[in-house]
Image (spheres, helix red, strand yellow):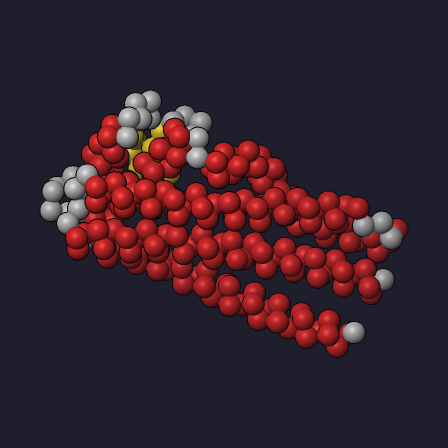
Amino acid sequence: MWGNYYVGEGYMYFAFIIIAIITLFAQFNVKGTFEKYSEMLNSRGYTGADVARMLLEQSGVTDVSVEPINGSLTDHYDPSKKVIRLSESVYSSSSVAALGVAAHETGHAIQHNEGYIPLKIRSSIFPAVNIGSKLAIPMVFLGMLIGYIADAYFLAYAGVILFTFVVAFQLITLPVEFDASYRAMNMLIQYNFVEDNEAKAARKVLTAAALTYVAAAAASIINLIRLLAMLNGGRRRR
Ligand SMILES: [Zn+2]
């Protein structure tokens, strides 16, 4: 039984290292791919801001504005203010990478406008996730200490439950992100914003971004398994 426990733990650390490597690779990859296709200008000469505004109009979304924001890869859609914020290298750039990112963020605005269910679920669990991502792990550690002294593990289990919200959030983020990119590519092609080779390049940028979300989701699952194993291990050692 103890032997199995250590073998299990070995696999877990192996998985943990693999996912850490994938996460690092995904982050370098998204930066590199974005930089590469920031050099490739689209033949129609549209900027990211142009594309976002035109796609909103084409989709009949009239209450969302498009603004610039500082930083690199800081692009996002803010559902509370109904604003698409595009970084400097997207807002006024006419690169293929800028078009892809601008169309993706517009995809989120359209999801919001349509009441896309995974986006609604994601927004509804966000408050719990905000607390959970800061408190869950300290709660498990403190809970294990209390458990060791008083044999009461409620705080540790509460921490684990809180952490499951973090995992749920990372998982529900996947369909939200994939769908935004799917919408982005469809719109860019349908409304003739890109040539064939430009569409391929834009898709590469969006796929690289999607991989970072997959890595984050995998990392959160491994962290949950690690917390549970630690808790069970702690209880057994008591
Ligand atoms: Zn997104």
Q: Residue 237 location, x and y as percent?
A: 82, 65
Q: Residue at x 73, y 74 (%)?
A: 4
Residue 89 at x, y percent in the picture: 25, 44
- Which of the 4 quarters of the picture holds residue 26? bottom left
Residue furthest bottom in the image: 3
Q: Nearer the viewer, residue 192 or 21?
A: 192
Q: Position of residue 118 (x, y in %)?
A: 48, 39
Residue 90 seen by the camera: no
Which image quarter is the N terminus in? bottom right
Q: Would you say 231 lies left or right of 224 here?
A: right
Outermost residue toward the top in this view: 63
- Taking the spot 45% from the left edge, 46% from the top edge, the residue there is 175
Question: In this orientation, which residue lies closer to the viewer: 107 or 35?
Answer: 107
Quarter-wise, where is residue 208 in the image? bottom left
Q: Quadrant of the C terminus?
A: bottom right
Q: Nearer the viewer, residue 135 or 122?
A: 122
What residue is drawn where x is 51% and y is 68%? 18
Q: Is residue 122 visible?
A: yes
**Residue 111 x, y percent position in the rendering:** 39, 35
- Asked if residue 33 lies left or right of residue 197, the reply is right
